[in-house]
Image: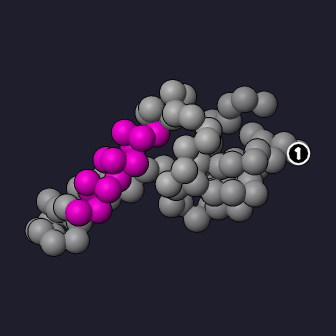
Amino acid sequence: MLHEIAANRGRAVAETVLGEHRPEVWISDRYAGQQGLAEVHQVCLAHVLRDVQYAIDCGDTLFAPKIRELLRWAIRIGKRRPSLKDSMVW
């Protein structure tokens, strides 16, 4: 099944769609129902960026702006990933 229409986005919906398949990596927002569906859970950086922007909009002038720049940098690197060398050392 590639698609499921449901009244919510609970864990049972994802499990129904996945069936017996378990991906190596699951990318989602931080919704708890979608954690543990794969070996590795990657939080969607766009969702985190949205939450950080919300903190800025609510008045955070110290921490959130610096995190926003770090997230923007990570997203830019991610867009370049296909052209980066695998041997790159940090």
Where's the N terminus, which quadrant?
Answer: top right
Type of the residue with mark 1: Glu
Q: What segment is highlighted magenta in the picture? A: 66-78
Residue 29 lies, in percent from the top left, at 50, 54
Identify the residue at the far right of this view. 20
Question: Residue at 76% of width from left, 45% of height from top?
Answer: 23
Q: Is residue 84 above or below residue 33?
A: above
Nearer-the-camera pick, 40 or 21:
40
Is residue 73 inside the magenta stretch?
yes
Is residue 9 inside the magenta stretch?
no
Residue 42 lies, in percent from the top left, at 58, 54
Q: Quadrant of residue 80?
A: top left
Q: Is residue 60 above or below residue 19?
A: below
Question: Residue at 50% of width from left, 54% of height from top?
Answer: 90
User: Which element carries disc 1, helix, strand or loop?
Assistant: loop
Is the magenta region chiefly helix, strand or loop? helix
Residue 68 lies, in percent from the top left, at 27, 56
10 Å crowding of disc 1: few (<14), some (14-19), many (20+): few
Q: Quadrant of residue 19?
A: top right
